[in-house]
Image: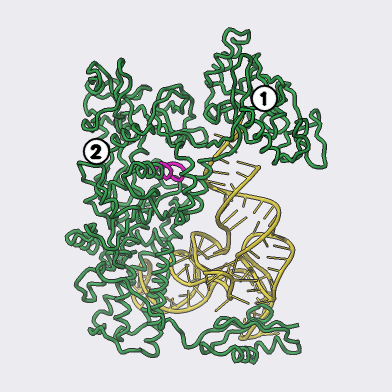
RNA sequence: GCCGAAGUGGCGGAACCGGUAGACGCGACGGACUCAAAAUCCGUUGGCCUUCGGGCCGUGGGGGUUCGAUUCCCUCCUUCGGCACCA
């Protein structure tokens, strides 16, 4: 294939840019711009599917550079995590060696595509100079009571042999390996993100530059619900509390359902005659996986405890049941059962013959419990609820709650669906948790000056055993207690890698600081992030954690703002031609290395960006590559072939006339279009505009002065998309300094104006004629011209004209009869 | 079930705030160059009809608002995404 010499051009300019330190972050920015793409897991040779993210960012960076901004555009590696450990088990290579090798390769791939990173600020999370600060942050959270240890039934993936955070369980399956997740009763470390639930929810309002979609996902995930906590007395002066959003149905409670995990159940039935059955039930239900338990098709089951509590307002006796449709981790783990007005309770009551008591009547209807086929969950009028009878139920909620409050039997309460963030992992390749377990003194933090707690490199058996691999490394585990100096043990678990990514963006501001996590002035200079780019899949995970850490650091006084990024853009996924997501494991990914070898980086860049709007999913195809390659070849050929004829002098006569003026108008339109499109993430249409302009340019005589001007501007407009070729053209035109040091072109509003404008003439909304009329012609004249057109006369002949609509400089619509 | 996004030629996709639907690209067809092919260049390309002037239909289906709707409203269908026994 005969094409332009992209190989020479690309390597030449990549080298040159490095020599001139084009991407270096300025130390004293005047107009700062912090652009960040979500950093990747370094999987080696990156594939085309992963590149969309970086390319979108690179286009913006290069344009901002030319607009005179001072940029921070860094890159790093989410380098801890399971794949390295799995590679170690499979191939016997140490996770660190494997990871560092992959980082090197991934980095080369990014450089091959000409992405504009300042590599001096590279951050690698698996190195001690980074994870030391994970540990430091852990200690800060611990001091504040935001890192705590608790025994809880937690998500456990039997295949990965580790616990998982709620955010890592998708539909009951492990996000990583799709294995059904089970529950284990373990003592683990948690970050108290629930303490920030309200702020995380409220502050979404501030995030104008975030996609609505992401904010909605976060709102759902946080899941605020407002209701009442009600106390139900037990026999001997004790009580149990439940959370409800339907206090208006309190008089309809006929049973209580208690989650099997609740320790209180065991005590309740202790020594009672139904103890055996209850314990048996608890045992089996805990063995069910999350999917089994939450399957909506499954019949709800439970067991009667034989015990009762008292409805605090009606005084009725209420049966206590254990049922596994109740979640222990939400509210109090106990639910009041109102079969008549809650579908789940209805099904449960039907199955076990528990009474159904109607307390809300729909308007104009009368519910009879025996005839009900489903619960009535809508609002209505209260009944059987003396003294609240005949109150509308919505109003009743407030009255019932007030009555409970007056008598000390209940209180207003807000619950959130979001759970505390479980961060312990029983794996090797992660940040060691900087805590020490002493039998005498309890659990104590490692002193700050003793950080980092280094991950041992030797003597580790990586094979998963369900216990952390670190627990079998004596040199790591054995430690003296910081308090009593006796023998103690380190915490054997490592941190979730989402801890790393919750603050990496801050480290870029001051990546080599050995004294502090970052210096406050450096953060003040660069943060918050002006534009963040990444996939939507992180909406309920990383993007919540990252906001949470920002708020914690704000509260600690380390940063002066409480939202980490002002604008967020979600790029779409790249699929293969069959519509499957590109991934290495599926084997359908286009590796970047061979592609660049065959087609060149610029062609790859144009293809990826022209394929469709950056925000939507797109399919990678060979056909797209051909179009992009042709486009670049045509540009190059045009310049080479016309080079001799291009006038040397840059000045043109002002103002140009005729054809020249037409070309110049088109040029100014292109500047406007490309500029606005990049700002609005319309990279595909920006490239289309460049193609359109090229189509004009090839028709023009190269010896006219406007031709030279056109090419100079065109090179600059092309530069963000195809930086190597654009730089080459720029220099072919005789420029000495880099195109990226040249200013971004500006358009002349005057030049956009046309002398004559095509006006569309419709009759009854249908296109019937086109006119070419002088711009700024008075309405009357336009009307006249339209009506006197021969084709329009054909349609209006013999008919009465009811109305003529004139849209200035656009169209005329003649309405007849 | 609830919430959200989307549905446009053979294909990827354009169309500002309601004003020429299909920009740009791919593919296809015809032509030029060539011994030939590739590459390149020129032309045509939503469907149907046509006396070659033009006409009718057409943006998932149906309805509505409007002089005019891919765009706004109602309703239904399909696809994708989020939440889903959260009390």
Supply the letter of whichever chain is yellow. B
Q: In the visual, does A326 lie left or right of A140?
A: right
The location of residue A733, given as percent across then percent down, is 24, 76
Residue that extends furthest to the left in the rendered view of this protein: A19
Q: In the visual, does B74 lie left or right of A98?
A: right
Label 2: few (<14), some or many (≥20) within 10 Å? Answer: some
The location of residue A331, given as percent across then percent down, is 55, 30
Q: Main secondary structure of the magenta part?
A: helix
Query: A576 or A659, which lies in front?
Result: A659
Q: Are tags 2 and 1 found on a single chain? A: yes
The residue depicted at 40 percent of the width and 49 percent of the height is: A563
The kind of secondary structure element at disc 2 is: loop
The location of residue B35, given as percent across then percent down, is 35, 74
The residue depicted at 35 percent of the width and 38 percent of the height is: A499
Tell me, yes or no, if residue A597 can be seen here.
no
Query: A779 or A607, which lies in front?
Result: A779
Query: A95 or A217, which lies in front?
Result: A217
Residue position for label 1: A312
- Quadrant (top left, top right, bottom left, bottom right) of the N terminus of chain A: bottom left
Relative vertical location of residue A294 with respect to residue A510 in this rendering, above or below: above
The residue depicted at 30 percent of the width and 83 percent of the height is: A702
- The image quarter in which residue A802 lies: bottom right
Relative vertical location of residue A207 with respect to residue A249 in this rendering, above or below: below
- Which mark is first along the chain, 1 or 2? 2
Span shown in magenta: A537-545
User: Which hue belongs to chain A?
Assistant: green
Q: Is residue A541 magenta?
A: yes
Q: Is residue A512 magenta?
A: no
Residue A127, numbered label: 2
Tell me, yes or no, if residue A356 can be seen here.
yes
């Amino acid at each position: 294939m005969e094409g332009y010499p992209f190989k020479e051009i690309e390597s030449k300019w990549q080298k040159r840019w490095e020599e001139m330190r084009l991407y270096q972050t300025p130390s004293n920015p005047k107009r700062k711009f912090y652009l960040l793409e979500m950093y990747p897991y370094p999987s080696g040779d990156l594939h085309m599917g992963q590149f969309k993210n970086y390319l979108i960012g690179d286009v913006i960076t290069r344009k901002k550079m030319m607009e005179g901004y001072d940029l921070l555009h860094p890159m790093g590696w989410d380098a801890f995590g399971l794949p390295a450990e799995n590679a170690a088990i499979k191939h016997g290579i140490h996770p660190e060696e494997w990871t560092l090798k992959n980082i090197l390769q991934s980095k080369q791939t990014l450089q091959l595509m000409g992405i504009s990173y300042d590599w001096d600020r590279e951050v690698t999370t698996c190195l001690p100079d980074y994870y030391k600060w994970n540990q430091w942050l852990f200690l800060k959270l611990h001091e504040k009571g935001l890192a705590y240890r608790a025994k809880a039934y937690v998500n456990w993936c039997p295949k990965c042999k580790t616990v998982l955070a709620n955010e890592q369980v998708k539909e009951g399956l492990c996000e990583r390996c799709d294995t059904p997740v089970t529950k284990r009763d373990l003592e683990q470390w948690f970050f108290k993100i629930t303490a920030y639930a309200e702020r995380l929810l409220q502050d979404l309002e501030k995030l104008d530059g975030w996609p609505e979609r992401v904010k909605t996902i976060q709102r759902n995930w946080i899941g605020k619900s407002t209701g009442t906590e009600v106390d139900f007395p037990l026999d001997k002066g004790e009580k149990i509390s439940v959370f409800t959003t339907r206090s208006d149905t309190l008089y309809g409670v006929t049973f209580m359902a208690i989650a099997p995990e609740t320790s209180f159940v065991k005590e309740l039935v202790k020594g009672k005659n139904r103890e055996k059955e209850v314990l048996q039930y608890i045992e089996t239900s805990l063995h069910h996986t999350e999917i089994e338990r939450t399957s909506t098709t499954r019949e709800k089951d439970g067991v009667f405890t034989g015990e009762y509590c008292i409805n605090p307002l009606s005084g009725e006796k209420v049966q206590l049941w254990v049922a596994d449709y109740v979640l222990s981790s939400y509210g109090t783990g106990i639910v009041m059962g109102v079969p008549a007005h809650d579908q789940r309770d209805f099904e449960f009551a039907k199955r076990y013959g528990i009474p159904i008591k109607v307390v809300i009547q729909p308007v104009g209807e009368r519910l009879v419990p025996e005839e009900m086929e489903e619960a009535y969950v809508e609002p209505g009028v209260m009944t059987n609820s003396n003294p609240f009878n005949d109150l509308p139920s919505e109003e009743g909620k407030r009255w019932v709650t007030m009555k409970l409050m007056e008598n000390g039997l209940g209180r207003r309460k807000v619950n959130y669906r979001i759970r505390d963030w479980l961060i312990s992992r029983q794996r090797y390749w992660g940040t060691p948790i900087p805590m020490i377990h002493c039998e005498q003194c309890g659990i104590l933090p490692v002193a700050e000056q003793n950080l980092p707690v280094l991950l041992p490199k030797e003597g580790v058996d990586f094979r998963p055993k369900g216990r952390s691999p670190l627990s079998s490394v004596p040199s790591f585990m054995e430690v003296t207690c910081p308090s009593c100096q006796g023998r103690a043990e380190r915490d054997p678990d490592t941190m979730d890698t989402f801890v790393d990514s919750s603050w990496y963006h801050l480290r870029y501001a001051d990546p080599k600081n050995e004294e502090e996590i970052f210096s406050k002035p450096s953060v003040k200079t660069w943060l918050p992030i002006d534009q963040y780019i990444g996939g939507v899949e992180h909406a309920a995970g990383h993007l919540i954690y990252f906001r949470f850490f920002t708020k914690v650091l704000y509260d600690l006084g380390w940063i002066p703002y409480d939202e980490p990024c002002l604008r967020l853009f979600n790029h779409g996924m790249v699929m293969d031609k069959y519509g499957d997501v590109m991934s290495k494991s599926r084997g359908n990914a286009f590796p970047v290395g061979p592609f660049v070898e065959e087609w060149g980086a610029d062609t790859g860049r144009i293809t990826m960006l022209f394929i469709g709007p950056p925000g939507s999913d797109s399919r990678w195809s060979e056909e797209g590559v051909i179009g992009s390659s042709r486009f670049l070849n045509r540009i190059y050929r045009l310049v080479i072939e016309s080079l001799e004829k291009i006038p040397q002098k840059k000045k043109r006569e002002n103002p140009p006339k005729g054809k020249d003026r037409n070309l110049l108008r088109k040029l100014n339109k292109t500047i406007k279009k490309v500029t606005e499109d990049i700002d609005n993430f319309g990279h595909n249409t920006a490239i289309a505009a460049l193609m359109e302009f090229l189509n004009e340019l090839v028709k023009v005589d190269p010896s006219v002065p406007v031709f030279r001007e056109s090419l100079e501007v065109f090179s600059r407009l092309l530069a963000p998309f195809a930086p190597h070729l654009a730089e080459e053209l720029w220099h072919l035109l005789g420029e000495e300094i880099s195109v990226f040091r040249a200013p971004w072109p500006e358009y002349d509003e005057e030049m956009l104006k046309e002398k004559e404008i095509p006006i569309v003439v419709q009759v009854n909304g249908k296109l019937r004629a086109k006119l070419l009329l002088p711009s700024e012609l008075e309405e009357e004249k336009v009307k006249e011209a339209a009506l006197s057109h021969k084709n329009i006369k054909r349609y209006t002949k013999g008919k009465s004209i009811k109305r003529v609509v004139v849209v200035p400089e656009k169209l005329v619509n003649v309405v007849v009869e």
